[in-house]
Image (spheres, helix red, strand yellow):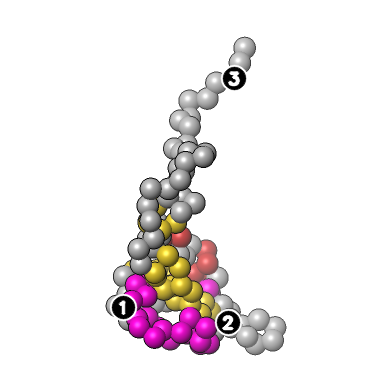
Amino acid sequence: MAASSSAAAPPPVGPAFGQSCHLAPVRDLLEWHRSVHPPGPDGSTGQPPSAVKFGDVNLVGCKSSLDGWVERHSDSAADTAAGFRDCSEIAWADDNPGYDVHALPAPRLKHVLLQAGNDC
């Protein structure tokens, strides 16, 4: 007798094999991140805030880069209880003219669209 499962198959992610994504990147986003952890043996508490720039479309998943962003950048209760603190922000690059993603520490963003973390 063959085993059967009552669980539904997961929904497909992104375009089917061989198909291209119908979405086209239109604007760039900036993502800023700061993370602090309890002091290590050397006394350090983390890296300086940093930033990255990327397009507004996730071509692999064929969806907006903003879809699920807060969930992917939120902290677990265990991380918070352990003393980890972080903050992530995302904004349109053209709302932050002249922003230098290579600056360390990276400055906070202006005109923030979304924010996640336990220390914002």
Pointer 1 residue: 95
- Badge 2 local density, few (<14 within 10 Å), some, or many (20+)? few
Q: Residue at x 58, y 81 (%)?
A: 46
- Locate residue 45 relative to residue 111 in the image: left or right: right
Residue 64, placed above or below residue 22: below
Magenta residues? 83-109
- Name the spot of residue 25 as percent of width and height, x first: 39, 60
107 versus 30 height, above or below: below
Residue at mark 3: 3
Residue 107 lies left or right of residue 112; in this view the side is right
Side of 113 where 107 appears, left or right = right
User: Which residue is pictured at 49% across the width and 69% down the height?
Assistant: 80
User: Residue 14, percent across and down?
Assistant: 45, 45
**Mark 2 → mark 3, Cα distance in angstroms:** 50 Å
Q: What kind of residue is marked 1? A: Asp
Amino acid residing under circle 2: Gln
Q: CA distance from mark 2 to mark 1?
A: 26 Å
Query: Mark 1 against mark 3, which lies toward the viewer?
Result: 1
Residue 48, position as x, y percentages in the image:
54, 84
Where residue 108 sits, quadrant-wise, is bottom left
Mark 3 element type: loop
Outermost residue on the right side: it is 41
Label 1 sits on a secondary structure element that is: helix
Question: Is residue 2 visible from the viewing direction of this image?
Answer: yes
